[in-house]
Image (tube, helix red, strand yellow):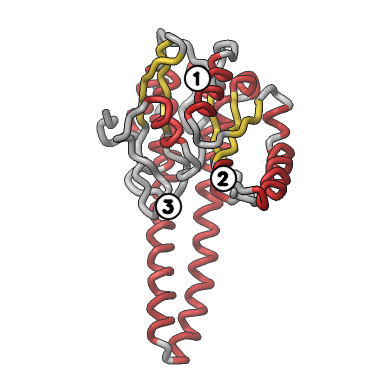
Amino acid sequence: MGMTGTGKSTFIKLLTGKKDIKVGGGINPETSKIGSFSFYHKHQRVIMVDTPGFDDNRPKMSDSKLLGYITEFLSEEHKGKTLHGFIYFHRISDVRISGTAKRNIRMMSSLCGPSAMKNVAIVTTRWDEVNKEQLQAAEKTETQLSGYFKDFTDNGAQLYRHDNTLESAKKLISSVLDFTAIDKIQIVEEMRSRKTLFQTAAGEELASQLTQLEADHVQQIEGLEKQLGAASRLEDNSYYDELNKLRNDLRGRRGKVAKDRQKLELMKIAPKRFKQLRSLITERRPK
């Protein structure tokens, strides 16, 4: 798990040796759906699941649909398999925790719950891009991150570095496989108690995030409209066009967020356990 562009797909490429795995990180990330990949590690078959990050600017899949897919996997698809852990990726080059990163961190926390935190590996990536002059600053960022993730580490989560080498990837996956198998995942237990997806901690967290995002977009649009008025009076066409493009983009994102929130809230009225997840997913799950 983690934001788009933090190295999730690249990590899987290293371990599986597959070159055709799509990698996110650009303006239009290629990783827009959940992918499952298997490989052998020390004679043991391992399955890794790559998930897109929660991000209102991601194309093709809404956050509510992504939550539905992840919950469905955790609830049903891993039956008969041992689930060892969650790996959360964060770029060491990200000195500040962005709003999107905070959203992803809170979503992971609400999905796992305190009892599964001992099975969480928080991995800082892109250490291979840190030179000698940047090392001190990177280590300072690492220390700051350890403070930010204190609630996780206090419940057993561990921090690791990854330098984008196969050796580093193997060392990390060995550590995760050494974790005691997960016995309880918060969202699975909540669904088993006949809660709707909206009523789970993750559902409530996502609904809160979407409400805040919509309010933020409204405020940003209002600000741009004031700037558009000023640009119109100045008769600066290029500046006006640039601002207008930004406003239209924000309007589209606001509409997407509002629709996503409404879709999630519909889950209040239909408590049918796991099958109810399908009401969120209008398309067939990608294979």
Of mark 3 and mark 1, the one earlier in the sequence is 3
Which quadrant of the structure image shows residue 32?
top left
Q: Secondary structure at mark 2?
A: helix
Question: Between residues 79 and 172, which one lies in front from this camera angle?
Answer: 172
Amino acid under label 2?
A: Ala
Horizontally, residue 240 falls left or right of residue 199, namely left
Q: Secondary structure at mark 1?
A: helix
Camera-side mark, 3 or 1: 3
Where residue 123 appears, as percent x and y from the top left, is 58, 33
Which quadrant of the structure image shows residue 87?
top right
Q: State the residue position of label 2.
A: 101
Residue 57: numbered disc = 3
The number of callouts visible is 3
Query: What residue is shown at x 42% (from left), y 88% (from top)?
Result: 236
Camera-side mark, 2 or 1: 2
Where residue 256 appears, as percent x and y from the top left, is 39, 52
Question: Between residues 219 and 231, which one lies in front from this camera angle?
Answer: 231
Q: Secondary structure at mark 3?
A: loop
Can residue 112 be seen?
Answer: yes
Question: Between residues 123 and 203, which one lies in front from this camera angle?
Answer: 123
Tell me how far mark 3 sits from mark 1, CA to CA: 27 Å
Q: Looking at the image, is 250 positioned above or below residue 117?
A: below
Q: Residues within 10 Å of mark 3 (few under 14, many from 20)?
A: some
Can residue 208 be seen?
Answer: no
Amino acid under label 3?
A: Asn
Q: Looking at the image, is 267 positioned above or below residue 96?
A: above
Tell me how far mark 3 sits from mark 2, CA to CA: 13 Å
Horizontally, residue 245 falls left or right of residue 133, namely left
Q: State the residue position of label 1.
A: 188
